Amino acid sequence: MARRKTSFLTGHYYHVYNRGNNHQRVFFERDNYLFFLKQTRYYLAEETADVLAYCLMPNHYHFLVYLRQDNLSEKMAFLSLSYTKAINKRFKRCGALFQGPFQAIYVDQEEYLLNLSRYIHLNPVKAGLVQKAEEWEFSSYQEYVELRRGVLPQFSKVRQQVRTAQDYRGFVESQNHLVQPYVQSLMLDE
């Protein structure tokens, strides 16, 4: 088994993502997204990590996490396996759902969290699924702009860089999407 390039250290931030095998869908209906979020809370958020931002897309997902324990690989494997088994049973399919193990990029500076959260929240807009980030139900953006009171995202570290929900909305919706080269390296180019 190949070793990961990224080491997981408690007290640090990571951009965690994966996509469907052959870029195929991993979420087929609304209940799939909701089940994946429920499993994320169980396997990841209860003990292992704070989920600062997330976005579930039809064929991939993104998480921005802060590690509280060093068992991220194990917990993500449990999450992936439990979700894949449920989808395979539900749709009478077999085989891998995801394109291998999850990927992760180490985020070494807190100042990049705000830009990375914007990138994650704008995924559905960039993909043409919605006109505005707030229209996509399966991301933490609605919590960030106080349209929903969810329990999964722990966004205080990100939101402390902007004063209010309205400021965050303005930041995300601004036309100034120029990203520093280093921040670009933290992003997955779909």
Image (spheres, rainbow, N blue to C red):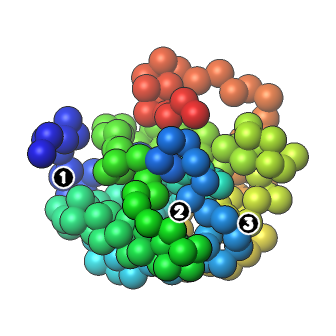
Q: Name the residue under label 3.
A: 137
Residues at circles 3 and 1 in contact by the CB criterion of under 8 Å: no
Towards the viewer: 168 or 75: 75
Instruction: Quote the CA–CA distance across marks 2 and 3.
Output: 17 Å
Could you say which quadrant of the image residue 74 lies in?
A: bottom left
Instruction: Report how many numbered discs are placed on residues in the image.
Output: 3
Question: Eyeballing the image, is 16 above or below 189?
Answer: below
> Closer to the camera: disc 2 or disc 1?
1
The amino acid type, in three-letter code, at marker 1 is Leu
Q: Callout 3: few (<14), some (14-19), or many (20+) C-alpha neighbours within 10 Å?
A: some
The amino acid type, in three-letter code, at marker 3 is Glu
Towards the viewer: 162 or 99: 99
Which mark is drawn over residue 9?
Answer: 1
Which mark is drawn over residue 155?
Answer: 2
The amino acid type, in three-letter code, at marker 2 is Phe
Q: Quadrant of the N terminus?
A: top left
SS assignment at label 2: loop
Q: Estimate the x, y position of residue 23 in percent, counting from the top left.
A: 55, 42
